[in-house]
Image (cartoon, rainbow, N blue to C red):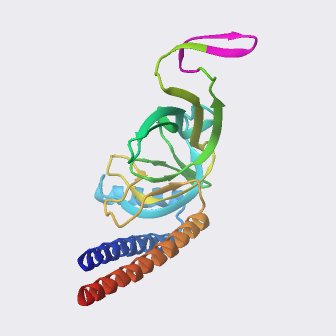
Amino acid sequence: MGIGLLIAGAVVAIVGLFLWISKGKKEGKSALLSVTDTSKISEINENFESMRSSMGNGNFTHFCEVKGVAHSDTPITSELAKKQVVYYSSKVVHEYERLEERRDSQGKLTKNWVKKSDVVSDNTNWANGFGVKDETGFIQIDPAKAELHAIQIHSNFEKGEPNADALVKFKIGGVSFGLGDTTPGRRTIGYRYTETAIPLNQALYVLGDANDREGRLLISKPKESRYPFIVSTKSETELSGDLGSSIKGLKIGAFACWIVGAGLAIYGLISMVTG
């Protein structure tokens, strides 16, 4: 028992260490949000043109913060909400119940309806030439590998008919009947439709690397992993608040793990000595 408690204490302490490391990474991100000044897009373009004229293409890189609105000359229409956006992610989830059998320790067999769900559709799309525009200009964004914060523009649940999984369905006097279930032991609850998006002209906060590595000026993920890449419908203040809450929670979690781990280790040592 004592050895087991020592191992458990060590495992809990290691979890605390991982939480502390995660806290440090978020503190670094929070610091970068605080110290990085907001750049005007015209200033980024001027610096890029100056660098290109003196050193040629492919040499410009500038970690920057940009605030403006989402823009594309060719916006797209979201799949569910039918709104003009520069990005959307739509999902349809089938919620149902399945009849499952379980046998207890005495060998008694019981049957229960258990809730399940399957994703039946999951589509993501970006408008061509997506970027951010402020009062001084426009710069394109490559959103690949970005920490993306979109907003929900559609949420709906459609309750399925009592015999939605039936092979043959008919109604008599307003009551639904079904024959020949396609999947015996399963009954549909309904379908949940959700969609998140970045609407056209939505206020946007972007933190990333302005560069011309792809042959044209755009903001993309920095080469150095310690620098974040954020494309967000949340403001800088909201992002900083979220990070602050997360840092506090991770700190409390780490200390809690170390206290519990130390307690388990001490109790294990006592058990080994007295046992």
The residue at 51%/38% (across/down) is 114
Q: Answer above or below: position of 47 versus 58.
A: below
Horizontal and vertical percent for residue 209? 40, 59
To which quarter of the image does residue 192 belong? top right
Q: Answer above or below: position of 249 versus 144.
A: below
Residue 162 visible? The answer is yes
Horizontal and vertical percent for residue 57? 31, 52
| Main secondary structure along the magenta-highlighted residues | strand
The residue at 62%/26% (across/down) is 160
Is 157 left or right of 226, judged from the image as shown?
right
The residue at 39%/51% (across/down) is 145
Q: Answer above or below: position of 247 versus 48.
A: below
Q: Is residue 139 magenta?
A: no
Q: Identify which residue, 63 or 194, lies in the foreground.
A: 194
Q: Is residue 174 magenta?
A: yes
Q: Identify which residue, 41 or 34, lies in the foreground.
A: 34
Is 12 left or right of 180, judged from the image as shown?
left
Q: Identify which residue, 26 or 32, lies in the foreground.
A: 26
Q: How many marks?
A: 0
Q: Identify which residue, 157 or 23, lies in the foreground.
A: 157
In which quadrant is the N terminus drawn? bottom left
Horizontal and vertical percent for residue 228? 41, 62
Q: Residue furthest front?
A: 106
To which quarter of the image does residue 241 belong? bottom right
In magenta, the rendered stretch is 164-177
In which quadrant is the C terminus drawn? bottom left
The residue at 76%/11% (across/down) is 173
Residue 121 visible? The answer is no
